Each structure stands twice: as C-alpha cells, then as structure tokens.
Amino acid sequence: MSANHTDFVAANSSQPPPPEKPADAHQKRRRRVSQALQKRRSVVAERTMADIRSSFVVMERPSLLSVTPDSNPYLNKKVEQKPPLINLTEDDDNDSSSTIDLTRPDKPLAPPPPVQKKRKKESSEPRVSVNDWPGLTEMAKNTGIHSVTCVDPGTRNFGLLRMEFYPTIRITHVRVLDLDLLAVYYQEKYNVKLKSEGAKFTIDAHLVVLQDYIECEIKKDNGCFNSSMVLVEEQSFDRNMARVEECVHATVNSLTNPLRLNADNRIPRCQVSSAKSIKSCYRPLFPDLADDEERPKKKPRKQPFGMGDVRGNSAAEEQRLFNKKNAIKHGRLILEQRLFKDVVPAANLTAEDRERVRTAKCDDLYDCLFMALYFGSCYLFHYNKMKTFSNDEKFVVTAAPPQRPHNCYEELFEVCAAIGTPAHFMQSLVNKLLKGTGETIEISKL
C-alpha cells in the first residue's frame, strides 16, 4: 500500500519538524480542512472494516468468522467530540457578519440562532442506504435477473460458465469448447463442407459453427446460453479474437429481447466488459506487475492495427499474462479445477465436457468465474439500485456500471459459502484481501 494512502496507514517521520512560521488565515483554513478530511477518512475506514466483517454472514447462516480481539482498537473506543473553537480575534473568511467585536460593550450581541431539535426516529430499525448490500439472491429476485452466462472468447479454446443467483446460488454449466471440434460436428449435422482436404478450419468457419451453437443453447430449456443475461469479455488485442467476441454479442442480442428493467430502461441481454474492469474490482487479488529496473527494455514491435499487441506495449502483454496466473492461483482457492465436475449438475456435463473441464487450460474457466462474481458486484447491484431507488432515472444501458462504493467482496463470500469452499482456502483469500490494512479476520467452520 502506498504511503500516501491515509485510510489505514498513518505517515511517520523520523526527521525533526521544521520551525513553525506565523500562520496566516489561509494556512489556518487549510489546516482545519485537512483535519476534517482526515477525520472523515478515519470514519470511512472504520465503517468499511465493519462492513467487511458483516459481509461474512451469508445466506442467513451462522457466521463463519471470529474476529481477532483488539485487532482494531478504534472500533470499541468511544470518541469524545469537542466543541468547535471560535476565533475571537481573526476572521478567516474576511466576513464582517461572522466577527464578534469585543471593543464596543454598548452594542448588544446578536442572539444565537435557534437550535433545531432533532426529530425522533419513528422506528428503531437502521435506515436503509442506497449502497447497502442486499445479497445476491435478493437482488436477483428484485430485478428478475436470475442468472448470467460469462464468456471468455477464444479462436480455439472457448470458455464459458453459467451461474444462477435465484432461487439459490449455484454453478449450472461449465464448458471449454474446442471450435475445431464444433466445426466437425456441424459438418456432420448439416452435411456441409467447411474446409478443403488437409486444410485447417478458418476463422469464418469457426464463427459459423459458434453462431449455430449459441442459437441452439439459447432455445434449449437447459441450455448454457439460456440465461437472463450474458457477459462477454472484451478482446481488443487481436483482430480475430475481436470477431469472436462480436459474434457472441451480436448473436445473443439478435435472438433475445431486451431486459425491461423499468419503464425507461431496456437493457440488451448481452453486455461487453473489459478485463481491466474485472481485475480492478478485485485489485488485491490482481496487483499491478511491479516494474523491474534490471529487466531489459524491449523495443516496440511494429504491427498492423488489430494484430496481437496493437500498440506495441510489451508491458501490457506481460500484465495480461500475470493476471491469468493470478486468476488460476486465486480461482483454485474458490473452487479447484478437479471439483468443477462435482459442483455442476451431472445432467449438464457430457463425458466429453467433463474430461475437457478436468484437463483443459484452466485460465479461461477462472476468468469466467471472476466475471460472474464481478457481474454480481457491479451489474446486478447497479440494476437493483436503479430499480429500487431511481426507478425514473435513465442510464446508459450498454455501458459497464461503476464500481460500487465500500466494496467488501460480499458476493465472493456468498458464492464460496454456496459451493462449499473449504475454510482454510477462504482464510487464504481473506488474508490476501486484507493485506496491508492492519486487520485480521479468522475463518472458523460452522
């Protein structure tokens, strides 16, 4: 955590303070503003850590946590509020109406303004805030968005995961498609020819078979694309990958009706989200790749637009590969690759799917898993807030919603509790999320 982060880290200095100079009105005003800002940040930090602890109580089950005693001395300490100081000698804002003149005793002092009495709360229940976390199941029920299919496109390996939020949280489909194998099945199914003898399937052939596969799964009652919404990861670093991404996006939106959230907002069923947004939502698990000064600098490669690293930025490519490693590393803590076949209903996995899920390159699977968590944290939360508190507000229905404030990763813990993540794996996740905050939370079995 950087030294200028003032939420949890107080800056210390061993150097003696410089001699104080006479403070003018502007300096006094800046000092008061700085003190007030630091006090507000301290309050936000305390509230955020309290929210993190409360977020572990999921699905009305007993708490998984026992908070380490005295882990935060500020949580149980009563804060004494001091009355504001009145400056009787100097006016910071040069406003004569706010200056008290003590040199003229014959002039009567203005009476103090009447103190408004605080209204007594009619109910003892806490006030509902627009940023409170209602829970994945409750938000899905309120919005009608009961499920999402997350897609990590590829020109050969094509990963997808379908997660339901209502009536219960569960993973219903996990697949790693081989587009070449789909093309072979397509030729046999429709008795057509998609390639010459001895040649490979082209990207155009892959798009044809992928479109047919999506259409069949949308129309199937238990299809992996028969979801309330579809979230596809943006693939702008390669021209052919971008074509696969747009094939999914266009096919889903052409075969499904927009979601009617309220009278003023019709949301396309398929949304495109950047990998950067997903990783920034879980920044402690996907840190930035540290710059290594000893690493030799690579010259930018000149490539046509849309081919590979379009801007010749090798650092961006290294960061992308580093994110994939972290997706596997932390995704395995949520659900091990060998256990996907046990979590997904047996009826939704063929013998071929089960083998590919067990042995295929697993970064696509875990990218889809974090996409589903991100969908619950951002999309589902934002749509529920618009439907509940801003029913007449219009918003850009094709844009990714903003990251929610005071993110405490409640959706991550709810999904872990639903799929049965072991307590020691959850402990590792919590330690990673709280690293650098000075807080410790211990996981215990139910």
Image (tube, helix red, strand yellow):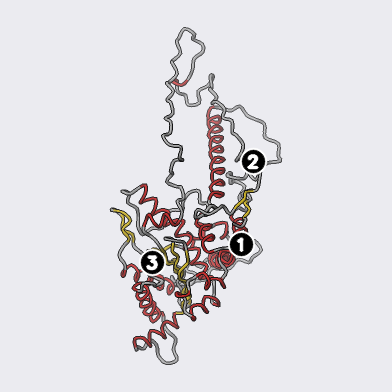
Q: Residue furthest top?
A: 106
Front residue of 368 and 121: 121
Indicate the amino acid at tag 3: Ser
Residue type (three-letter) at the residue carrying disc 1: Phe
How far, Cα to Cα, is label 3 from label 2?
Answer: 47 Å
Within 10 Å of disc 3 (Cα), the crowding (few <14, some 14-19, many 20+) is: many
Task: List the single residue furthest toward the bottom.
Answer: 197
Residue behind mark 3 = 227
Disc 3 secondary structure class: loop
The x and y percentages for residue 233 are: 44, 66
Q: CA distance from mark 2 to mark 1?
A: 28 Å
Give the quarter of the image for residue 146.
bottom left
Sort mark 1 into few (<14), some (14-19) or many (20+) by Cα contacts within 10 Å: some
Occupied quadrant, residue 213: bottom left
Q: Amino acid at mark 2?
A: Pro
164 relative position to 259: left or right = right
SS assignment at label 1: helix
Determine the residue positioned at 56% across, 52% down: 63
Does the CB distance between marks 2 and 1 fall below 8 Å? no
**Distance in Å between CA atoms under marks 3 and 1:** 30 Å
> Where does the image place residue 166, in percent across and percent down from the top left?
42, 60
N-term-proximal mark, 3 vs 2: 2
Residue at image location 55% in from the left, 24% down from the top: 85
Res 425 label: 1
Q: Identify the residue under disc 2.
A: 73
For residue 143, above or below residue 311? above
Indicate the position of residue 163 as horizontal and vertical percent values. 45, 65
